[in-house]
Image (cartoon, rainbow, N blue to C red):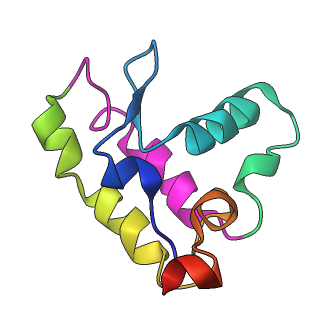
Amino acid sequence: MIKCKWRDEKRVLVNIDGQVWPCCYLVNNEYEYAVSDSKSGYEDNQEVLESYSSYKDELNIFKNDMDSINRHQWWKELERSWSDESKTLKQCAKWCTLKEEENE
């Protein structure tokens, strides 16, 4: 079970370029993708992360207000991915999966 720590604390990360991200784990991956030839960040069923690039303008604080960004469909897509292991981002699975004892 995924429990997003950043979402629960109502936190996001805003890059210097204005891109709004749900957490540092995903933005680090985006940076790696941008500077790497391997594009390793988007391998292994990272569809939700790939789809972020389709919405960059809509998820940018310089082009949209925070209220609109928070209501954007991409966030819903991200949250839905947590209940489907084949679509869960590897960063979400690694950093925000509840351990058995935390789940009780």
**Which residue is drawn at the image coordinates 58% and 44% (left, top)?**
26
Quadrant of res 59: top left
Where is 51 relative to 1, above or below? above
**Was residue 67 drawn as part of the magenta stretch in this picture?**
no
**Which residue is drawn at the image coordinates 68% and 70% (left, top)?**
45
**Which residue is drawn at the image coordinates 48% and 43% (left, top)?**
53
Residue 74 rendering spot, x and y as whole percentages: 34, 57
Q: Is residue 100 visible?
A: yes
Residue 17 rendering spot, x and y as whole percentages: 44, 15
**Which residue is drawn at the image coordinates 56% and 54% (left, top)?**
50
The one nearer the camera, 3 or 30, is 3
Q: Is residue 97 left or right of residue 42?
A: left
**Was residue 60 drawn as part of the magenta stretch in this picture?**
yes
Residue 61 rendering spot, x and y as whole percentages: 26, 24
The one nearer the camera, 35 or 99, is 99
The one nearer the camera, 56 or 13, is 13
Q: Which residues are magenta?
A: 45-63
Residue 63 rendering spot, x and y as whole percentages: 22, 22
Q: Is residue 93 left or right of residue 14?
A: right
